[in-house]
Amino acid sequence: MQTEALLKIVQTVLDERKGHYITTIDVRGKTSFTDYMVIATGTSDRHLKSLCDYVAEKAKENGVMPLGIEGDLGSDWVLLDLGDIIVHVMTAQAREFYQLEKLWSVDPVKEAVPTHDNVRASKI
């Protein structure tokens, strides 16, 4: 299954199951372990777990086996690893605290290339 098709399924399931503030971050070129991160807010620990369970079930129906799921009832953050897509479902408090959108939206630092003006000649 193409990554973009799976991404659409993930977004649709989260929306249909009342996930809030669904955000997709394209992290290609920023990391090598995944292409997209999908972040959503749930209303309770039970809601977080059920959102990830529904996404995992739908992925399996479409031939994608989840690589893992972390977090359970009592957690304020549940992570579902689908390989090219990682789903983070968090409580509002955890999402505000960890600020994953801010962390992953930062562009990589580009190395400065010295020019003639900013290179000092050293005398020996």
Image (tube, helix red, strand yellow):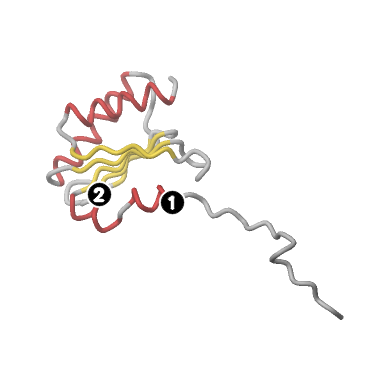
Q: Which residue is mark 1?
A: 106
Residue 34 percent location from the top left of the image: 46, 38
Q: Which residue is mark 2?
A: 77
> Is 18 placed left or right of 104 in the picture?
left
Q: Residue at x 31, y 19 (%)?
A: 61
Q: Dividing the image into 4 quarters, which one contains the C terminus?
A: bottom right
**Mark 2 near mark 1, Cβ–Cβ under 8 Å?**
no
Residue 38 percent location from the top left of the image: 33, 38
Cα distance between the residues tagged 2 and 1: 22 Å
Q: Amino acid at mark 1?
A: Val
Q: Amino acid at mark 2?
A: Trp
Q: Residue at x 42, y 37 (%)?
A: 26
119 or 86, which lies in front?
Answer: 119
Residue 45 higher or lower than 11, as above or below: below
Residue 22 percent location from the top left of the image: 25, 37
63 or 2, which lies in front?
Answer: 2
Q: Could you tell which of marks 2 and 1 lies nearer the N-terminus?
A: 2
Under tag 2, what secondary structure?
A: strand
